[in-house]
Amino acid sequence: MTAEVRTTCPYCGVGCGVLATPDGQGGAAIAGDPEHPANLGRLCSKGSALGETLSLENRLLHPHLNGARVSWDAALGTVASEMARIAEAHGPEAIAFYLSGQLLTEDYYVANKLAKGFVGTPHVETNSRLCMSSAVAAHRRAFGSDTVPGCYEDLDEADLIVLVGSNTAWCHPVLFRRMAEAKTRRGTQFVVIDPRRTQTAQESDLFLGLTPGSDVALFSGLLVHLADNGFRDRAFVDEHTAGLDGALDRARQIAPDLAAIAAATGLTEADITAFYDLFARTRRVVTAFSMGVNQSVQGTDKGNAIINCHLVTGRIGGVGQGPFSLTGQPNAMGGREVGGLSNMLAAHMHFAPEEVDRVRRYWAAPRIVTGEGMKAVALFEAVRSGKIKALWVMGTNPFVSMPRANHVRAAMEGLDLLIVSDIMADADTAKARARTTVLLPAQGWGEKDGTVTNSERRISRQRRFLPSPGEARPDWAVLAEVGRRLGHGKAFAFESAAAVFREHAGLSAFENNGTRDFDIGALTDIADPAYAAAPPVQWPLPRKGGRQGKPRFFADGRFYTFDRRARFVAVQPPGLAEAAGGEHPFVLNTGRVRDHWHTMTRTGKSQRLSAHRAVPFVEIHPDDAGKLGLNEGGIARVATVHGHAELEVTVTDAVSPGQLFMPMHWNAAYASTARVGALVRGVPDPVSGQPELKATPAAIAAVSYRARGFVLSREAVPMPEGWWWAKAAIPGGWGVQFATQDGSREVALALRGLVQGAGYQVAEYADHARGRYRCAVYDGARLVASIAVGPYETRPDWEAAKALFAGTEPEVAERRALLSGRAATEGAGPVVCACHGVGLDVIAATIRAGAGSVEAVGAVCKAGTNCGSCIPEIRKLLTVETPKAA
Ligand SMILES: Nc1nc2c(c(=O)[nH]1)N[C@H]1C(S)=C(S)[C@@H](COP(=O)(O)OP(=O)(O)OC[C@H]3O[C@@H](n4cnc5c(=O)[nH]c(N)nc54)[C@H](O)[C@@H]3O)O[C@H]1N2
Ligand SMILES: Nc1nc2c(c(=O)[nH]1)N[C@H]1C(S)=C(S)[C@@H](COP(=O)(O)OP(=O)(O)OC[C@H]3O[C@@H](n4cnc5c(=O)[nH]c(N)nc54)[C@H](O)[C@@H]3O)O[C@H]1N2
Ligand code: SF4
Ligand SMILES: [Mo]
């Protein structure tokens, strides 16, 4: 064991501090950093399982050109010469970059400088367009700058937390635990506003299950209520804001009375009144919002409708109060700081002539671009139309995550030059082929070095604790090398991440003098050792301000508009881009599950994280399922105008009738047909350009196969063409669940050869007349593979087989059980607690045996005692199982 290294979790925007202790064999022990102010030692299930994602399996380790391995020199030679050729022939604007909120600030800075300053293309866009660009636009309209006013401490100190379109319990779990502690400590109340009764909603004091897309009606009604009932902060509104009258007029039109609000939102008048009263009489209120707000055709208006309510009450900038955009990605904020969105220039500057001039001088870049580039949806449209000839995709997987992904894929395959920088060889986008395709291996988390900024503006270091594998390089270094090859040696002479950071910090302070919110001038001269050792720090951090950042903005009522007043915004009436109906009668909502990250290229490697939900699924209300003959665990085809997916059915009243919910995670390496982007329309918000990803009209129907089963094997085995399948990491190897039109005999033939190595013994049980087949493959006493097939109606239960597979040498009784399909011992059920691998059946039995609280359950079976991400699910089981115990 070598010494532990302080670093930062590479997943969500909470930005938890991690202590990583490398084991010397490519792995590391992972723990929460007790000294990091974001998490004070806690980690959620994803953070805790980081150690399971570090293997080099399927890593992209060498540069490739058109499918063949080449040297870095050859790969970057092609990149530079092709970029130069395309710029020469079609102009630099034919070149685009599509970046990611998961890049480090240093990577992002160099990419932005290269493109906007030296290649001369404004088309530098990022997946953050799909994530929080509506929040950015709402901030800019209200505050004159993209400023997050508050900090995490406000969540500890609030008396009311309103969560809008945010499944915080699953997506920002460590923050949710802070909120839950505030509840215990000071009785903080939670209101959850979401069309879906999420795990977060289960924990709320008031759940408002509104009609999709109707948030603006709810918050317009709230604005009127606050303004008309004596909750207006007159001094604040008069001295520090503008535009209330116009915003209020519009709000009155949208929400003339309670009945109209109830009709628009589908909520009861009693619930609406309860929410308005609670908000009105609680001074310390934080309204936290994420993708249910942002990923909407009126995401910017939703954000401003929320901010309006904070401005009218003057609840901004004070302890425990304010609107709070929860950022998704670990460096969503860093991307905003460097100018990673195509409508920003750099360092929170836009394209005003004096701003362009300032950055031109700082960069010494005479060819700097002078206007905005295209936003994601338009950008990929321009790829399709041929306007964009070269695209560099870095740290994002658009074949899965972009709306109309099939369209996007076809468009990208028509490019003259496609460059993909990724860490995984099996990422869907890394498998694309354009006329010239260059694949560049990036250093991943634990291998690279730099900074990220979390939701509360806190800059933390990601540090290297593993050797760099194969020929992987840091993204910033590759970009800088291309800059040098294009003839800009001086501008891209960076010798380290620290050098990049210094230049970035310098730009933030350059001719700033308090005119721009983003200022980290105090770090401009940070020396290499200080950068190496830098503790987490919040911005702003101006040169003259000392080493302590400022936790909150706007307490002084001074904003970044020209008159330093905040703006109320008159919003548009609520609505979705397209109404469900006709052949597509359902609203398809999409989002996340607790234990997977995005397109699964990393969390898919973890068996702990794959146990919670092992198969892609669609949630549907029992009434709809009944009408359509859909059964729990059956397979359904969900289709939109743009594409389709086949998913396992989960029948639940967590979704309302007429709605479907599907997770965004499964990519083509993990499931046959479950890529979310293929289905989603993604009409962009007119202000922010962020596409609507939560409400595409869809149809759903049962699908019937002849057989269904699973394969467990030490190495992953590919499924035959035409089968439905989903792959999951399991203890000791891989599990694939499948369904097929073949009978058990054909399945046996197709699969047995895939798992049967030389010298292995095979034990089989076949009853093909009944469509049943089971097989266990042993290498000596060790179980190396197991196959089970049954008729389609029998949903395969693989928990018992998985348990045997995880062990070393099954007993005779267990071997027999494996073939008979009956478990030798009682199963544990699907995993609830990922950290300790505790199943639902075990927790339910513990409760029935008398454990009456989360703590008691933990004391008996350990569930919920590590990261706590499963505590909401345990609490739900307590409500269900406790009555049975009595
Ligand atoms: N486990 C996990 N955590 C993550 C991530 C992950 O992949 N996995 N990704 C990270 C990233 S990048 C992001 S952006 C965040 C996202 O974090 P969240 O925003 O919390 O996650 P989502 O599940 O995308 O969507 C949130 C909720 O919006 C609701 N919603 C849909 N339509 C509407 C509507 O019209 N109004 C309202 N009020 N709500 C609506 C959905 O039902 C859903 O429950 O999570 C981050 N954390
Ligand atoms: N329908 C629907 N679509 C959505 C969403 C939704 O809720 N619904 N959410 C949207 C949101 S909020 C987001 S943030 C996006 C996320 O979508 P993506 O950004 O496409 O998802 P990731 O899986 O995080 O992709 C990251 C890629 O970068 C690679 N990678 C990891 N580390 C590195 C590195 O250090 N360097 C490089 N070069 N590559 C690396 C990974 O292997 C992976 O291929 O999806 C969006 N799309
Ligand atoms: S909450 Fe979980 S995923 Fe997010 S930063 Fe913390 S440990 Fe990582
Ligand atoms: Mo995101």
Image: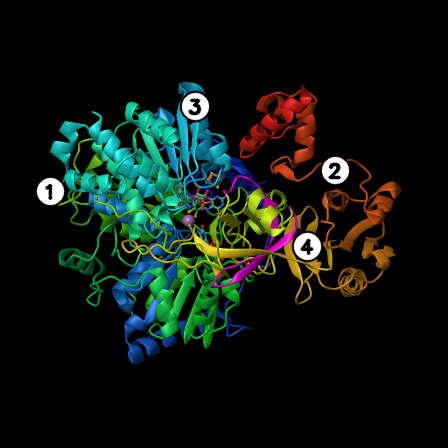
Residue linked to disc 1 = 563
The answer to the question of whether label 3 and label 2 lie on touching residues, with beta carbons closer than 8 A, is no
Residue 535: name its quadrant. Answer: top left
**Residue 402 visible:** yes
Residue at 45 percent across and 76 percent down: it is: 436
- Say few, some or many: other residues with alpha carbon within 10 Å of mark 2 (under 14 / 14 to 19 / 20 or more): some
The answer to the question of whether label 1 and label 3 lie on touching residues, with beta carbons closer than 8 A, is no
Residue 1 is one of the magenta-drawn residues: no
Of the numbered discs 1 and 3, the one sitting upstream in the chain is 3
The answer to the question of whether label 3 and label 4 lie on touching residues, with beta carbons closer than 8 A, is no
Residue linked to disc 4 = 736
Residue at 29 percent across and 60 percent down: it is: 113
Closer to the camera, 629 or 87?
Answer: 629
Of the numbered discs 2 and 1, the one sitting upstream in the chain is 1
Residue linked to disc 3 = 183
Q: Which mark is residue 827?
A: 2
The amino acid pointed to by label 3 is Lys
Q: Position of residue 461 (x, y in %)?
A: 40, 43
